[in-house]
């Protein structure tokens, strides 16, 4: 038996000494687990052989469960290390020793003791206040990158399988469940958009995206609209027939329920918006009881909101809160994802920065939900994207995918300012600025459904940073819903904290289609404002030819970016993912948010994604 233990221990010792450092680097194993595997000071061949089986059991359990102990350092005595290496047939693999030399790149610090031993101290551990557990490195079966609306849905749905360990990584803070009462007031109040948690506060308002668990569902206008059936039917050709309106409609209805969608209460309906609905009927538009009904192809009505009373009901409340108590779901907040770690055609994990420390998360699969503005820069930092752009960034080409960051689509906007009359004053109670909506067909509409949104607003003026802090301002906004213009998103650098390069290229289509549709909307606004119910509260001086010629020169959108990791067949150079959301050329990396939408719906895209992409992609994901 002793001989068997000696032989078995020798084999284990060989593996530990030869592969141990590389395992530590590749998997992000914590100091204690590595110490148990390697031996505190390589206590000699005999002890190594005798306890080989015990060490194997310990390491095997640690690897299989992904639960590492919380030790802090590994001490390596150079003389004993050389003796151990010579004892195993003189093997001294330089590549393995190089792994130890690379430890500082991961934030490990080296120090020497009086005896000459080198001690490697792990990066500072961060205390997770929610479960009291100190962690240095992480491991999960599935890592979801991005805690926005889609990320919350994905984390909730994926963790329904108790055997699957799921980690949701969010760059911003997590204020916990709604019932805990820790959320900032501005993020809860549905009557005004919030920009306190913007990724890029200095960017124009239409680039706004929230850096917080729940993403932009935490700061949005709470509108809940469903696109026209042809929008979703157009996805059929990009998804090999899997996705169309019939397939997605049940999920859209589920989302309306989960997000607590309700109408605008009578007490919140301002005189201005009542006048808009009445004026629209005066000029021939139908009044819509439900702007989302199947027969609401054109007309005016009140926009449903995802809110309870005046509390914005965001995706974290709707989807993540019910799952927070699951032992197989971990939320890691305030962590920037630097890049994916790719080996061959697989991601073995992600690299993150948290509390100033670089850490690695081992993963069986990775799902990207960082949004249309966030996914392309992350892929590019990982060496995935157009080769020319990767060279310019200084990133190695891991996978050439020319469609990454291309095909950016949003609904372009034209703003028409009105002059308030003396009868129009700010309401003495808080009321959400946009409440009513006109769904309108332009003369270029290609089907029986609307291709314009006309959105009236009246409230405090918005400053350059998107804050409503000024005096009374009245506007009517024309949104072009079937755009042909395409823009792009780029990584500005390899620094994950750097702002991306975003260029929607509104009104840039060669045929001028988008601009002509928008001008149709401008004409309709002139007719609308001339209606007597509206004329009492605001007036519009007829536009000059110069104003009409200037349409498209000012860049502004509807906060609905999609398409930068578009779905499509693998032989289409513009596509990035397949019908299952899996990135072409990789076996375990998926995209599960609005960036994969190939054709933008005529609605706010937050709701287009919350149900169907979250639940739908999961249903076909080949996850562990």
Image (tube, rainbow, N blue to C red):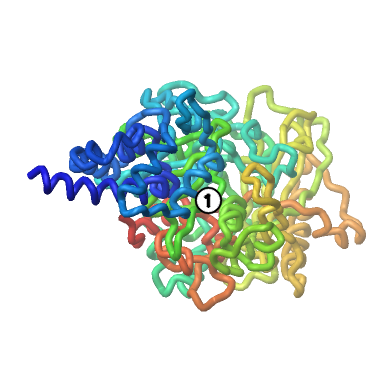
Whether residue 362 is visible here, answered yes or no, is: no
Image height of 376 relative to 206, above or below: below
**For the residue carrying disc 1, how many other residues have a C-alpha within 10 Å: few (<14), some (14-19), or many (20+)?**
many
The residue drawn where x is 72% and y is 33% is 467
Query: Residue 70 location in percent, x, y?
Result: 36, 29
How many numbered marks are there? 1
Query: Residue 138 location in percent, x, y?
Result: 40, 40
The residue drawn where x is 88% and y is 56% is 547
Image height of 548 relative to 155, above or below: below
User: From the viewer's perspective, is 44 left or right of 480?
Assistant: left
Residue identified by numbered label 1: 225
User: From the viewer's perspective, is 12 left or right of 409?
Assistant: left
The residue drawn where x is 78% and y is 38% is 464
Q: Quadrant of the N terminus?
A: top left
Query: Residue 171 location in percent, x, y?
Result: 55, 39
Q: Is residue 18 or residue 135 the one in the foreground?
A: 18
Q: Secondary structure at mark 1?
A: loop
Image height of 366 relative to 194, above or below: below
Q: Is residue 72 or residue 185 the one in the foreground?
A: 72
Whether residue 315 is visible here, answered yes or no, is: yes
Q: Is residue 21 or residue 291 the one in the foreground?
A: 21
* Direction bottom: furthest residue: 571
């Amino acid at each position: 038996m002793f001989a068997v233990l000696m032989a078995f221990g020798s084999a284990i010792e060989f593996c530990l000494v030869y592969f141990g450092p590389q395992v530590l680097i590749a998997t992000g194993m914590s100091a204690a687990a590595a110490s148990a595997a390697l031996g505190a000071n390589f206590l000699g061949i005999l002890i190594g052989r005798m306890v080989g089986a015990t060490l194997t059991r310990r390491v095997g359990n640690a690897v299989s469960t992904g639960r590492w102990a919380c030790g802090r350092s590994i001490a390596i005595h150079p003389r004993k290390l050389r003796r151990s290496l010579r004892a195993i047939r003189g093997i001294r693999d330089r590549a393995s020793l190089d792994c130890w030399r690379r430890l500082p790149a991961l934030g490990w610090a080296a120090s020497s003791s009086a005896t000459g031993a080198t001690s490697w101290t792990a990066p500072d551990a961060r205390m997770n206040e929610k479960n009291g557990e100190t962690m240095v490195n992480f491991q999960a079966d599935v890592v979801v990158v991005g805690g926005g609306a889609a990320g919350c849905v994905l984390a909730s749905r994926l963790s329904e399988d108790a055997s699957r360990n799921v980690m949701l990584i969010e760059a911003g803070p997590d204020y916990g469940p709604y019932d805990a009462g820790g959320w900032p007031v501005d993020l809860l109040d549905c009557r005004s958009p919030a920009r306190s948690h913007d990724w890029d506060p200095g960017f124009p308002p239409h680039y706004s995206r929230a850096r917080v668990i729940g993403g932009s569902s935490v700061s949005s206008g709470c509108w809940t609209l469903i696109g026209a059936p042809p929008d979703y039917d157009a996805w059929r050709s990009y998804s090999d027939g899997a996705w169309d309106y019939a397939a997605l409609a049940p999920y859209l209805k589920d989302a309306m329920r989960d997000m607590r969608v309700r109408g605008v209460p009578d007490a919140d309906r301002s005189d201005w918006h009542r006048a808009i609905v009445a004026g629209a009927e005066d000029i021939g538009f139908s009044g819509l009881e439900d702007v989302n009904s199947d027969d609401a192809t054109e007309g005016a009505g009140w926009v449903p909101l995802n809110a309870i009373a005046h509390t914005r009901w965001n995706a974290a409340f709707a989807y993540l809160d019910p799952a927070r108590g699951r032992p197989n779901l971990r939320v890691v907040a305030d962590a920037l994802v630097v890049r994916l770690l790719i080996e061959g055609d697989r991601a073995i994990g992600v690299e993150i920065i948290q509390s100033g420390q670089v850490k690695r998360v081992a993963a069986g699969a990775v799902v990207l939900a960082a949004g249309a503005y966030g996914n392309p820069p992350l892929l590019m930092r990982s060496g995935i994207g157009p080769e020319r752009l990767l060279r310019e960034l200084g990133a190695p080409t891991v996978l050439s995918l020319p469609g990454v960051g291309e095909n950016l689509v949003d609904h372009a906007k034209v703003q028409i300012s009105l002059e308030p009359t003396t009868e129009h004053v700010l309401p003495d109670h808080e009321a959400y600025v946009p409440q009513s909506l006109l769904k309108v067909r332009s003369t270029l509409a290609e089907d029986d459904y609307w291709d314009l949104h006309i959105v009236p607003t009246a409230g405090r003026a918005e400053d350059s940073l998107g804050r409503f802090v000024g005096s009374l301002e009245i506007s009517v906004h024309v949104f072009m819903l079937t755009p042909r213009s395409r823009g792009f998103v780029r990584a500005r650098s390899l620094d994950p904290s750097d702002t991306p390069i975003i260029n929607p290229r509104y009104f840039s289509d060669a045929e001028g289609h988008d601009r002509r549709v928008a001008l149709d909307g401008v004409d309709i606004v002139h007719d609308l404002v001339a209606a007597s119910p509206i004329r009492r509260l605001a007036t519009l001086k007829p536009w000059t030819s110069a104003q009409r010629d200037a349409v498209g020169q000012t860049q502004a959108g509807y906060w609905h970016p999609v398409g930068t990791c578009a779905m499509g067949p693998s032989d289409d150079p513009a596509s990035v993912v397949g019908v299952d959301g899996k990135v072409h050329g990789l076996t375990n990396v998926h995209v599960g948010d609005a960036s994969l939408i190939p054709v933008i719906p005529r609605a706010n895209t937050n709701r287009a994604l919350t149900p169907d992409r979250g639940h739908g992609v999961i249903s076909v994901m080949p996850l562990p």
